[in-house]
Amino acid sequence: MKLNLNKPFIFLVITFISTHLSAETLLNQPIVPIPEIEIINPQQVELGQLLFNEVRLSEGAQLSCASCHSMSMGGADAQIVSTGVNRQKGNINSPSVFNSSLNFRQFWDGRARDLMEQVDGPIANPKEMNFSWEQAIAILKKDPFYINSFEQAYSDGLTILNMRKAIVSFEQSLLTPNSRFDRFLKGNKTAISENELEGYKLFKQYGCISCHQGVAVGGNLYQKFGIFGNYFKDRGHITEADYGKFNVTKKEKDRFVFKVPGLRNIELTAPYFHDGSQQSLLDAVNIMMKYQLGRIPKENTSELIVAFLKTLTGEYQGISLGGKNQ
Amino acid sequence: MLFFSLSILATWLYSYSQVDYLTYQQQTKVIRDIQENTAALTRKVILVQQGQSYNYDKVAKTLNDNEVLVSILASEKKNKLSQIIESWNDLKVIVENIKSDHAVYQNSLKYFPIGTEHLHSELSTNKNNKALIKALLNLERQVILFSLGHRADTFEQLNSQIKAFNTLAEKLPKDTEFSVLMLSKHAQIILKKQQRLKHRNTQLLNTKIPQQIQHQLTQYNQNHQQQVNQAAKIRLILYIVCVALLLVITVAKLKILFLNDKVKTR
């Protein structure tokens, strides 16, 4: 018996099988695309954005959260360590505020469970904003604009809790979806170049993926800095900030242990590491190869990995953060 | 006087005849959720290690969700609950350690055969390296067997084998010696982390949380049942008091009617 399969039917079957197989392959990747942002209460987010940029939340109205977490600088400030009130230098590199809600803990040493806990940190830090919520609310209560805005956004109006909630709402909205790599993961095979794809394969082969995986490409576990060598001894001048999680737990095994940072938008957030010691992404990758992975990269390996890392730059408010290459 | 006394007694009894279902439901829900999340967390940690889950996101999320629930328990400040909180804090550390160790272990496990191959081809260029190549290939076999959990040399034996391998490499050129030392470090990590992961997985699976929660649930249920029984008794007394109250009212009413009739007949 001869089967009567017409051409369109065969085409449909082939298309189904190929799309199904490719989709399955991409779904089984350790990196997951950032979901689309779902803003439940835009008023609260807007209010949070205002507070994020509000200098009156710091001593002498000198700076705001945005001073160290600028949207135009990948959510950080391009400094080795940030400058706080009265031109005081901080102890540690400012992490990006973009995608911070995807982190399993907040701060380099993971001392805050979530953004609600984190938000109390910088405002009270004497080297950062050196202020208190009580002082801040006293100032904002004199401003009819804030009183009205809070009354519209929250049933109980302007309170310390609502101020914190508003900032957290804004921070939660700072996701950067739709990077070229996310588009690739969603099935657009032309979203990244062959070199970049090669870089991704090397990223997996060389073991970077062991720690940098998940939706944030990191940010979901702790790791010791210096597994295959003593990074801190080689770098010299060890400070308290280098102790990482030890500063929180006081347990010896947590010395030099840090939250693995997410690599989203990494090309925009130099200098790198908690100490801001590396200005170039290539140097940072090579340091990771040496101290974390115990590998001697072949020629071009690190360059290709850097090319892949640059595909992780996403969009904020529908506009690519990277500009070129996007 | 009797009427007022009975009324007060009835009101008092009524207030004690209520059962606090809401608190009971809230308490048992939180504790059951912790039980479920703990089981889910254990499962998710194992799935990552088995390679069936591709990242730690779900583990991290479940851990954080449970952390929130445990903080609700912590606010209750009951001695019995402190055992659960303590066990949870231990479990949290175990999970975090498994995540960190597993990441490092995976890296070395994936690289070790590749590194061996690279080193093998590097050493093969010199005929004098025959003994070292033999030691390298033997080490590769033993380490992989060890990582697979098959019978291989013991941890201590393998460790001394690695040290002997490093000694053999001392005469090599600096670059090759560095490759040997790096590979040895990977081998050591495989041995150490495999042992550690085995131990930590045992700790994870032997957590006391399920038993402690079961015990706590029984406690909650018993307390609740006691409350229900007590309320039933109080309601019975309340019923009797109400009947007595009705009788008092009826007697009083009859007395008034009787007195009215007497007044009318006069």
Image: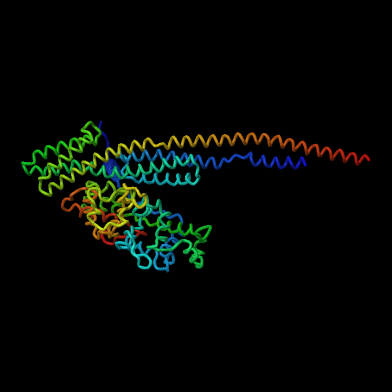
- Based on the displayed image, in which of its 4 quarters is residue A116 positioned? bottom left
Residue closest to the eye, A239 or A163: A239
- Is residue A326 in view? no
Which residue is painted at 54% across and 40% down in the image?
B24
- The picture places residue A239, in percent across and down from the top left corner, at 30, 57
Q: Nearer the viewer, residue A208 or A230?
A: A230
Residue B246 coordinates in the image, percent (x, y): 75, 37
Does residue B92 appear to the left or right of B13 in the view shown? left
Residue ID at (64%, 40%): B16
Q: A193 or A29, which is in the foreground?
A: A29
Image colouring: rainbow
Residue at the extreme right: B266
Tell me if residue A314 comes above or below residue B76 in the rendering. Answer: below
Quarter of the image for the N terminus of chain A: give it. top left
Tell which residue pokes out farthest to the left in this image: B127
Does residue B102 appear anywhere in the picture?
yes
Left or right of residue B240: residue A110: left
Instruction: Kindly indicate the quadrant of the structure image that contains residue B138.
Output: top left
User: Viewed as shown, does residue A31 lie left or right of A141?
Assistant: left
Relative to A171, does residue A13 appear above or below in the rendering?
A: above
Give residue B117's position: percent from left, percent from top.
Answer: 15, 42
Which quarter of the image is occupied by the C terminus of chain A?
A: bottom left
Q: How many marks?
A: 0
Q: Residue B104 appears at what percent x and percent y?
A: 26, 44
Q: Residue at x 55, y 42 (%)?
A: B22
